[in-house]
Image: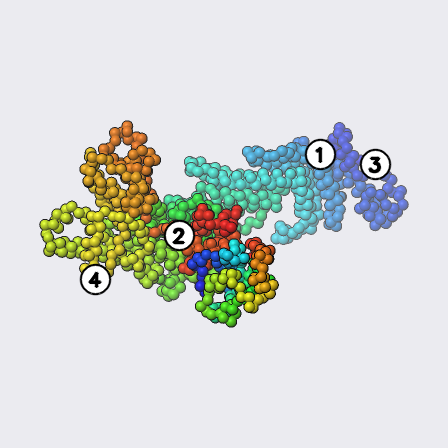
Amino acid sequence: MATAIPPQTSNRTLLFSSIFPSSSVSHTTPTPIATPILGSTAPGQSFGGFGPQATFSQDADQSQDIARDIIRREKAWSIATRFLSSAVQYAGQSQSGATRRGREVDVALRLLLAGAREGTEQLELVEWYSHEVREHYLKGVREGVRELWRSEILIQDAGNTLAETISRLHAIQAAYLQPLVEHIIPIIREGEPRQSTETAEDAPTPSKLTAKKFTRDLHALFVHSIPQQRYSKTLAFLLYDAGCRLFRLHSEKTADAKEATEEMQSIRKQVPALLRGLQEVGLGDDRAQRAFAHAMDKLMDEFIISHYMKVDWYGKSSVTRRLRQWVKEGFAPFVKEVMQALGASDEPVTAGEVQQWQDMAIGRLGRARVDNLFDYIVAWDNSLGAVLDLKEYIASPIARTQLTSTFSNQISRRLLHAGATTTHIIDIYIFVIRAFTELDPKCVLLDRVARPIRRYLKDREDTPRVIISSLLTDTPEDATEPPKPDHHRTEISLEVAKEIMDAPSNINADHDFDWGNMNWTPDPIDAGPEYKAGRSDDVLSYLLSLYDRDDFIAELKTILGEHLLRNDTGIFDREIILLELFKKRLGDDKLQACEVMLRDVEDSRRIDASIRAGRGAVVAEGAAIEAVAEDKRAPGLHAQILSSFFWPPLREETFCIPPEIKEQQEKYERGFEAIKGMRKLHWLHALGRVKVELAFEDRKADCDVATWQAAVIYAFQDEKGDAEGVLQVQRTVQQLVEQLEMDEALVRQALAFWVAKYVLRETSPGSDTFSVLERLPTTTQGQDLTPTVEDTPTVSAVKTQEDLLMENMGIYRQFVMGMLTNGGNMDARRVHMMLKMTVPGGFPFAVEDVAMLLRMLESEGAVVRLGEVWGMKR
Amino acid sequence: MSLMMSSTPGVSAFPNDGDLLNWTGTIVGPDATPYEGLTFKLSFNFPTTYPYAPPTVLFKTPIYHPNIDFSGRICLDILKDKWSAIYNVQSVLLSLQSLLGEPNNASPLNGQAAELWDKDPVEYKRLVLGRHRDLTDDEL
């Protein structure tokens, strides 16, 4: 029977297979060309490998028709497959691999695909075809594609590689699809029942399903021949790069506008084209979308750190508005375009999505700003823009927590360490206050971030001093010039000094109870239930609330006292302002002492004047001539009368003052008693200032010095008056100490002061003997005599803590000794704690002072040090 | 509660670790007694009714004495029924210091010591030294 049907194939195929007796030919013929003697098989007997056919044959009766039918089918299969396989073979080689199907092929195909209605038959052929294509692809094409992706894709090659891949795959796909589209699909379609045109579009007809399945298989093939990771990365980079170029993220300067728009347009064309290409060869969809998502993620980050989102240092305005605009008008359309190219739905980007992206962008911007927040704070208030950027970010509690915790970290790492001066910390603190009130008018955030700063500032000893002295300094008009450190060597915080100038008037305005306040907002959700809404946004109240009132007032007293004593202009405007300010904040009653102090200095000027006048009158009554003579000779004396009860403890060194002054003092005292009734004057010799006029052999010198310095130089004059300059007056330190009954340290300080002024000199180095320098040495001589003391340590009028410690040394010694005797050995910290607890009236010193005290006791031989602990000497 | 601020030679006291109701006191043995040159630690425990009730005073350092038993309990009238609110830590310490030199042998807690005090001073001194031992910091 086989011989009865001559093999009818298309000439071309025959020709081809005769020339290329390739394995594929034999492979493509699942049924032998010469039909086996099927007819002779027993009915119902299996044909072996050919399931469907076998089924057919089983279904069929023994009738000859069916047997013939089967054979016909076999034959058709053979013809069709051979035709298709040659088409596949061609696909690799020629672009115009369009094969015409001959009549026989046509018949064969029709026959084979006629089963389309049953839905099984034609799939057989398509499946086979798919397999064929796969074989071909794996053999011929895959290597080429793999080669492209074998090594890492260089950044500059990314575009090319992708384009090349697309073009190759595209070509091969077209070739593979052609036979299917040209030969198989139309036939299937013919067999389909006619459908109404309305439903035809979307209804899954067998032909469409077939095509779809085929392409899906093909795409899977393509996808698997490309390394996934590398592909995603490359694509992501390409998209990211395109995005960067599109939004010009890297080029600072705005190049030629026309050029720019051209480039943008070309990118806008290129990218979707490329992506469509990818989509067509099956590399789009999920993978590409994922890569795209990565790219957009990076792009957004890039945009945030790009020059567009730089902090606005000059305009001091927020950039969030621009960011939102960009997301809406730049980012979203770009995403849309790309997604369309990648085959996502055509729906326009919804407002919700844009909103989401905007929020995301704002969040990222916020985090970027928070990372550098400390720098912005330092650069306040040029960095207002950055802080305003944050304002939108901190809408959510998480963001707020993130902000506070990050910023607290930054502060503790960069500010609150021993290397930062108190002034610096206070300045920064003020900036923090200002910036955070701007950021969050309710001050909840401020409350949180400021806590560590406040705690740290409280630990610093010199904080109140810096604050108060700063408040008392005159603000220079141009703040650029750093203020001269005053004699106390306290650094001045300019910011604090500036603050006093613009202290707001409504300190006690309570926002929550101001019913007319149209700007009222509820407390933020992260405010604790106990949270007191920002009392006022002025910085001073924060600074002043750093300490307990009493501490602050004590410090204020000390500093104010010193300030008043030093001030000899008689103008106390600033002090009065300050005092009023403090009164308002800390309460009138507490500042009584300070007020008394202020009044004292004012009153004493008046009393001084009246005493002098009065004395003049008294003298005039007695002996006018003498008085005049005396006035000429005797030094003038002014006094400040202070109410000792209200002033802080003052320095009280006693020494012998020159008799002339003593006399004056007594007179003054009498005058005072006459005016003030029963009150007594107690002179504090160490505190005054003296105008000294020194006459040398070759020059004169005018100095304004402290009393103790004057007393020392007076001691040199004394004898000279008698000896009339014949003998150089020489004094040893010891002599001076005895004569003046002055502290040795003070004598030495005074001597050093005068040596520095070229008034005295040490007769020979180390001899402790000084003499007056009557003639200035010539320069050559002067060099070895050049005084070394330039900067004499100055003595403050008010007692320092250290002085207090020394004063109470006796009591503390008792306590420490008792403690160590009975409690055994202890370390300095424990001793400190015990002292704090047991000393009546409190122990205002630090652990370091205790350690010093212990060392002093050790040097006295009372205690011994045993490593970390101290014990009694046994 | 009066603090011991003045320094009386030979006696001192201080609160334990900030607990103002528990003090540690120290007595140096008076000269010309068998206790010469020895130091003795005491514990003071003040009742809440102080100064209307006497503090509980115990010798922490082991001591050989007619009026003090081996666990450090003291037989002294001012710490018992003769207590008065005008006494303070310092006066108690001074009383105890003088008790060391002048024991009350009429009401001994340690009979042997009371007997030896008069009979055999040398043996007494030997026993005092034998019993005495300076406390380490941990035992306080």
Residue type at mark 3? Ala
| Chain that bears disc 4 | A
The residue mark sitting in front, 3 or 2, is 2
Q: Position of residue A678 (x, y in %)?
A: 23, 62
Horizontal and vertical percent position of residue A545: 39, 57
Distance from label 1 to label 3 (Cα)?
29 Å
In the visual, does A117 lie left or right of A447?
A: right
What subunit carries mark 3? A
**Residue A365 left/right relative to A23:** left
- The residue at 27%/58% (across/down) is A643
Q: Is label 4 or label 3 in front?
A: 4
| Location of mark 4 (residue) | A677
Q: CA distance from mark 4 to mark 1?
A: 125 Å
Q: Which chain is indicated by disc 2?
A: A
For this rendering, which residue is in front, A190 or A771? Answer: A771
Whether labels 4 and 1 share one chain: yes
Q: Position of residue A734 (x, y in %)?
A: 31, 42
Mark earlier in primary sequence (1, 3): 3
Cα separation between marks 4 and 3? 150 Å
What residue is drawn where x is 40% and y is 51%? A461
Q: Quick check: A250 left or right of A745? A: right
Type of amino acid under label 2: Leu
Per the image, the residue denoted by label 2 is A805
Q: If you read the primary sequence from the N terminus, does the residue marked by circle 4 or circle 3 appear first?
A: 3
Q: Identify the residue shown where x is 65% and y is 34%.
A: A146
N-terminal of the pair, mark 4 or mark 2, is: 4
Give the residue number, with chain letter if any, for mark 1.
Answer: A139
For disc 1, the neighbor class at 10 Å (few under 14, some 14 to 19, many from 20) is: few
Q: Are marks 3 and 2 on the same chain?
A: yes
Q: Which kind of residue does numbered mark 4 sit on? A: Gly
| In the image, farthest residue toward the bottom | B81
